[in-house]
């Protein structure tokens, strides 16, 4: 019990983590902003092009082109996110080098995101509390992937081990950085409401705030992960077969439930369309 309390006390306090994150953020801001802004610049160009050309719902080729361009934006956004993490983990990377490394890691990033999301969702399907617990336990899977190279379930297991015995302190640090980020958002919303200005203007400034200070939150998470990793030290995953089975089981549970819901939804749409078609058939009796 004494060792456990000693380990927990070694976790840096939120203010110190924020100060360290801010110092790194100031040094790396141009690079991190350059990485984060690229997909939004593309989106702005896409939006302006759509606005200039005008919507043409009757033009199938135009609609198809817009769908392809939206898919490109999604891929570019995911690419920028993994590149941002690479730049935070490796402080020597330039924008170009971060994107080059991100291009190698993007598929693993998507797989880990999908796996982590479904495992957490599986916890929520069982009951709300397991989902909340897992959302904290698995908060650092991306950093395990980029920093240590562990993939799939191994990344989930390592994140779980780092947070284990520190769940409440980690939750407190996550809540702290979220609150720090939400305070200026609330102030912006209150300011625009006080002046009676359109909500859209407030949303624009909130999006700008998210773009410019999003990297700070990523750094904060990374420093928390490094702190936990240094406390845990080296360990083996050989004796974690039961937890591996739990994660796989939760993943399959969420996948099956989502598949059933999807089939039910599209089946309902199909049957509704079929009934409408039947109703349109002339009756000759």
Image (cartoon, rainbow, N blue to C red):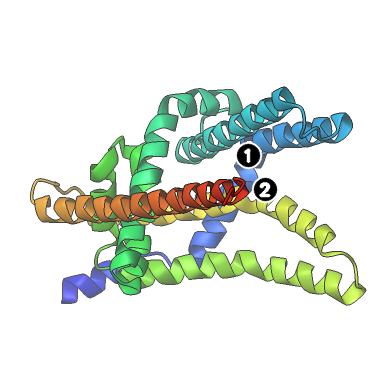
- Quadrant of the rendered structure where residue 19 is? bottom right
The residue labelled by disc 1 is 36
Label ID, residue 85 = none
- Figure disc tally: 2
Residue 276 place in picture, x, y as percent: 58, 51
Under circle 2, the secondary element is helix
Give the quarter of the figure containing the N terminus: bottom left
Q: Residue at x 56, y 52 (%)?
A: 285
Asked if residue 242 is positioned above or below residue 9 in the image, the reply reads: above
Residue at the spot of label 2: 211
In the depicted view, which residue is nearer to us: 203 or 99? 203
In front here: 57 or 9? Answer: 57
Image coords of residue 227 (percent x, y): 36, 56
Q: At x 41% / y 57%, what residue is drawn?
A: 224
Q: Is residue 59 left or right of residue 219?
A: right
**CB atoms at circles 1 and 2 under 8 Å apart?**
yes
For image coordinates 25% across by 50% down, the residue present is: 252
Task: Label 1: state its secondary structure.
Answer: helix
The residue furthest left is 239
Give the left or right position of residue 184, taking residue 200 as reference.
left
Which residue is rendered at x = 35% and y = 49% of the image?
259
180, above or below 78, in the image: below
Spatial distance from mark 1 to mark 2, Cα to Cα?
7 Å
Q: Residues within 10 Å of mark 2 (few under 14, many from 20)?
A: some
Earlier in the chain: of badge 1 and badge 2, it is: 1
Whether residue 10 is visible here, answered yes or no, is no
């Amino acid at each position: 019990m004494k060792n456990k309390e000693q380990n927990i006390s070694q976790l840096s306090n939120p203010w110190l983590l924020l100060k360290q994150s801010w110092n790194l953020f100031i040094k790396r801001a141009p690079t991190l902003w350059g990485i984060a802004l690229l997909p939004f610049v593309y989106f702005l160009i896409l939006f302006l092009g759509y606005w200039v050309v005008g919507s043409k719902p009757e033009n199938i080729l135009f609609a198809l082109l817009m769908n392809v361009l939206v898919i490109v934006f999604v891929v570019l956004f995911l690419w920028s996110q993994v590149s941002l993490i690479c730049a935070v983990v490796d402080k020597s990377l330039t924008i170009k080098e971060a994107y080059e490394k991100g291009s190698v890691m993007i598929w693993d990033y998507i797989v880990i995101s999908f796996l982590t999301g479904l495992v957490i969702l599986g916890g929520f399907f069982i009951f709300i509390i397991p989902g909340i617990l897992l959302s904290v336990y698995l908060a650092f899977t991306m950093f395990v992937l980029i920093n240590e190279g562990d993939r799939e379930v191994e990344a989930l297991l390592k994140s779980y081990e780092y947070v284990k015995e520190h769940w409440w302190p980690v939750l407190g640090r996550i809540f702290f950085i979220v609150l720090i980020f939400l305070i200026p958002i609330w102030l912006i919303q209150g300011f625009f409401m006080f002046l009676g200005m359109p909500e859209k203007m407030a949303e624009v400034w909130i999006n700008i705030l998210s773009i410019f200070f999003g990297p700070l939150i990523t750094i904060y998470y990374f420093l928390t992960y490094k702190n936990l990793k240094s406390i845990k030290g080296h360990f083996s995953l050989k004796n974690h077969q039961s937890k591996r089975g739990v994660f796989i089981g939760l993943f399959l549970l969420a996948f099956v439930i989502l598949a059933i819901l999807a089939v039910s939804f599209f089946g309902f749409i199909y049957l509704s369309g079929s009934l409408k078609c039947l109703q349109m058939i002339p009756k000759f009796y």
